[in-house]
Image (spheres, helix red, strand yellow):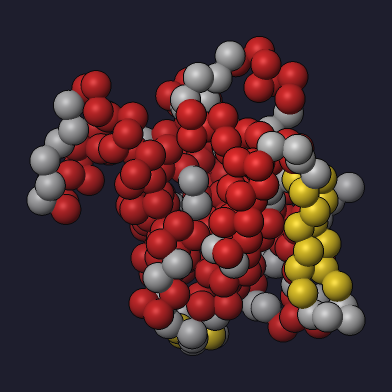
Amino acid sequence: MASRLSLRLEICEKFIQDEVAYVRSRLKEYFPIINCRFKDFTLHDESHISAIESILDWLITEQTLEELNDYDIFCLICSIWAHDIGLGSTVEEIRKFCEHKQIPHPEDNLRTKFVRDNHASLSREIIKKIIAVGHDPRLASLSDIIGQIAESHVFGNLEQIDAYIPVTVTGQIVKPLFLAIIIRLADILHCTHDRAPWILYKARKIEDTVSILHWKRHHATVGVNYDNNTDAYHIHVQTDDIKTFEWAVEYVKMM
């Protein structure tokens, strides 16, 4: 079943639909690199993207979705797809990133850690380049906005993001701050067991201590829901392991 966000895209102007398809096709190239480089990680693939879109179905009301214009939808979808894509950065992209930031290039044996620690900023640079040199110049001005939104899912640097920005060509108003907030929240809320299939955990023979905690926390999280009466999100965890429980509590505090 298609998400409401996908259905909303279907009524966007054709050039926006085409550009979303182009961006998705470019970003899909990074998923195999991520899966190969971070075998200990929970799922950071298209299933995670689909889950975030499904969460947005109940995170964004129908009325709010109707109030988002086509450019908001473009920024939202591109940012969702791009938010973790820095994990798949190529060696050349890492080199250019280090030159741009004027920081030392990591040694080969430290590259994976460097990418993990800097993946949000790497994601920003990757999506900026893709949008800036995309098929339609009417959307190129949104490249940095989308990059900021994608990057903010880790840093939570929302104070650096403008609430409203006019699109250069059309003058329509895009709402970057709102988009950044809901993507960050949806990403946090995708903490359920479907992101860490137990059979995959066993097959991969994961050894990294932090990764093991992530997998166990996800596997112990049986559900997430929103309570209209209390205006609160509830994360349901079932575990006999105290470390997993404490980790889950700390995770909720991020919200």
Could you tell whether 111 is left or right of 234 in the image? left
Question: Which quadrant holds residue 62?
Answer: bottom right
Question: How far across and how far down the image is residue 240, in percent?
Answer: 75, 38
Residue 125 shows up from this direction: yes
Could you tell whether 24 is left or right of 12 in the image? left
The answer to whether 230 is drawn above or below residue 192 in the figure is: below
Question: Which quadrant holds residue 203?
Answer: top right
Residue at left offset 33%, top offset 38%: 115
Question: How far across and how far down the image is residue 16, in percent?
Answer: 60, 61
Tally the marks.
0
Residue at left offset 38%, top offset 45%: 119
Could you tell whether 40 is left or right of 249 in the image? left
The answer to whether 231 is drawn above or below residue 107 in the figure is: below
Question: How far across and how far down the image is residue 32, in percent?
Answer: 52, 25
Quadrant for the C terminus, please: bottom right
Residue at left offset 77%, top offset 49%: 237
Question: How far across and how far down the image is residue 155, in percent?
Answer: 41, 62
Residue at left offset 11%, top offset 41%: 104
Could you tell whether 184 is left or right of 245 in the image? left
Question: Which quadrant holds residue 86?
Answer: top left
The answer to whether 252 is drawn above or below residue 205 in the figure is: below
- Front residue of 173/251: it is 251
Residue 71 shows up from this direction: no
